[in-house]
Image: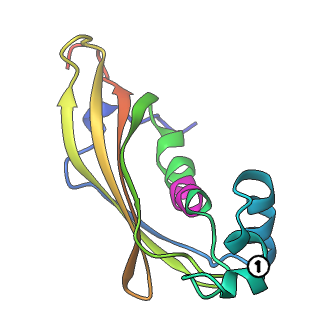
Amino acid sequence: MTQKKYFEDFEKGFRHQYQVPGLTVHEIKEFATRYDPQRFHLNEDEAKKTHFGGLVASGFQTQLKCFEPFCRQILAGTKAVGAPGIDSLKWLRPWHPGEQLDVNIVLIGKRLSSKRDDRGYLDFKLEAEAYKTMTLTMKWVVIMLTRDGNA
């Protein structure tokens, strides 16, 4: 069994990089039908008439597809106990069908809780690019247990 990582196991500057495969038209429409039923996510002809010029993924789908690998590859192996929320989420460019996203996540801050000695806060920043153009940025905090509760 793999040992879980604690707050102390993460250093400021920690990086995690990966690629998110492009979505199919079907995947974009399927997500939009359930969660974000706007014409530029659902109908290719209607989407061509918008400023997007074609079908695009929901910003929320983009965020989730970028965040999922981090959760599975990093957070699942930690003593994370939640998050107080997302500090910043920006959709800077639409994600078109078939475009691969290059994701870079950096630990930009780290601090112990001032109220509870058994945890600390890890500040992460995610940047996702398609064709070397920034598509999405997100900053959030993860609450993580310390190894001995007194770190």
Q: Viewed as shown, does residue 54 lie left or right of 127? A: right
Q: Quadrant of the N terminus?
A: top right
> Which region is colored magenta?
62-69
Relative to 141, does residue 84 appear above or below in the rendering?
above
Q: Viewed as shown, does residue 81 lie left or right of 123? A: right
Q: Number of marks in the image?
A: 1
The picture places residue 134, in percent across and down from the top left corner, at: 37, 76
Residue 52 visible in the snapshot: yes
Relative to 126, does residue 135 appear above or below in the rendering?
below
Going by the numbered disc 1, the residue's amino acid type is Val
The picture places residue 62, in percent across and down from the top left corner, at: 56, 64
Residue drawn at (68%, 74%) of the image: 40
Q: Viewed as shown, does residue 5 lie left or right of 94? A: left
Confirm whether the magenta stretch covers residue 134.
Answer: no
Question: Quick one: 67 or 48, which is closer to the camera?
Answer: 48
Colour convention of the picture = rainbow
Residue 80 visible in the snapshot: no
Question: Quick one: 66 or 60, which is closer to the camera?
Answer: 60
Relative to 58, does residue 107 appear above or below in the rendering?
above
> Which element type, helix, strand or loop, lies under badge 1?
helix
Residue drawn at (57%, 54%) of the image: 68
The picture places residue 136, in percent across and down from the top left corner, at: 42, 66
Quarter of the image where one finds residue 137: bottom left
Quarter of the image where one finds residue 58: bottom right
Q: Which residue sits furthest front?
A: 49
The picture places residue 119, in percent across and down from the top left corner, at: 30, 21
Residue drawn at (18%, 16%) of the image: 114
Residue behind mark 1? 25
Magenta region, mostly helix, strand or loop?
Answer: helix
Q: Quadrant of the C terminus?
A: top left
Badge 1: few (under 14), some or many (20 or more) residues near its Cα, within 10 Å?
Answer: some
Residue drawn at (47%, 35%) of the image: 3
